[in-house]
Image (cartoon, grey):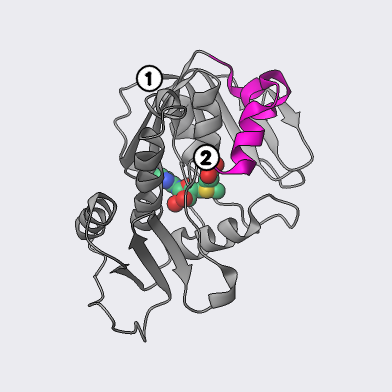
Amino acid sequence: MINEKVFFAADGVDGPAIDFARKLAGKHGIPELPAGSFPGTADFLLRADVAGLELRSLREPGAGPVRVDFSADAIQRRARDALRRQNLVRAVGTGVEVLDATAGLGRDAFLLANAGNRIQLLERSPVVHALLADGLRRAAADQELAPIIERMQLHCMDFRHWDQERRFDVVYLDPMFPRPDKRARGKKEMVFLQQIAGEGEESDLLARALACARGRVVVKRPPREGRIDAQEPSFSYRGRVSRFDVYLP
Ligand SMILES: C[S@@+](CC[C@H](N)C(=O)[O-])C[C@H]1O[C@@H](n2cnc3c(N)ncnc32)[C@H](O)[C@@H]1O
């Protein structure tokens, strides 16, 4: 994993949002900058204000912050798409129990929960986990989103340490793309994610996922990227931005 220097900073009067973020930063060992100080040696700033937590690159100040916002237009548009047209939902199914072993910023998991699935999310990067945990906290307070968020449960954990005894109908994998696809949505987020979380070791992910899956494993790939390992998928759903390889154990 890439060891970027990340500091936490609170901006504004303490309240529930800042308390929540400060606790997460403390739990993950992310040092807090004293108010008004400048993080000369930091690469990223995890900044909390009354509106929640966001990640800023101090090396690329023009890049703008990344935050998890499930009420944002883009994800809401996708969530409203006829479910059957979404390749993600076609590949995973509906009404099933899913393990999203590489949760990232939780967008795919949100779309799957919106389609009626129950999801356990694993994220191994403490910074990405903190952003997602904060996004889930805010969404849980929104009347419309709360029933969807109630179906999502997040853990800060590497899939390699997950209890292999537990089985899920579907295990979903979206490991870090080797290179962000130029046409991919949210390219800025993907670049940040790569810098913060690094490229994963992918070689044993599929075997682990197959060992946990009762029904199937779904792996998201860029459309022209090779498969995750030597094993051929049983079938794939191909879209303009992503391909979903389906493995039947
Ligand atoms: C491409 S992102 C996932 C994006 C996600 N599907 C979304 O919709 O936002 C990959 C994420 O998986 C995480 N990750 C990679 N390998 C992992 C592992 N073995 N266990 C847990 N998380 C992992 C990375 O830290 C990164 O945040």
Label ID, residue 167 = 1
Part of the protein shown in magenta: 72-94
Residue 212 placed where, x, y %? 41, 24
- 68 falls in the magenta region: no
Q: Nearer the viewer, residue 185 or 163?
A: 185
Q: Nearer the viewer, residue 134 or 194?
A: 134
Residue 24 higher or lower than 207, as above or below? below
Q: Quadrant of residue 142?
A: top left
Label ID, residue 225 = none
Q: Going 28% across and 82% down the picture, which residue do you hit?
A: 36
The answer to whether residue 174 is visible is no
Image depth: mark 2 or mark 1 in front: 2
Residue 77 placed where, x, y %? 66, 35
Q: Going 43% across and 66% down the picture, which residue do you hit?
A: 2
Q: Quadrant of residue 244?
A: top right
SS label for mark 1: loop
Question: Residues under labels 2 and 1: Cα distance?
Answer: 31 Å
Residue 45 placed where, x, y %? 39, 70
Residue 137 placed where, x, y %? 34, 41
Q: Quadrant of residue 101?
A: top left
Three-letter code for the amino acid on which mark 1 is drawn: Arg
Residue 231 higher or lower than 118, as above or below? below
Three-letter code for the amino acid on which mark 2 is drawn: Ser
What residue did someone put label 2 on?
71
In the rendered view of the protein, which quadrant contains the N terminus?
bottom left
SS label for mark 2: loop
Label 1 environment density (alpha carbons within 10 Å; few <14, some 14–19, many ≥20): some
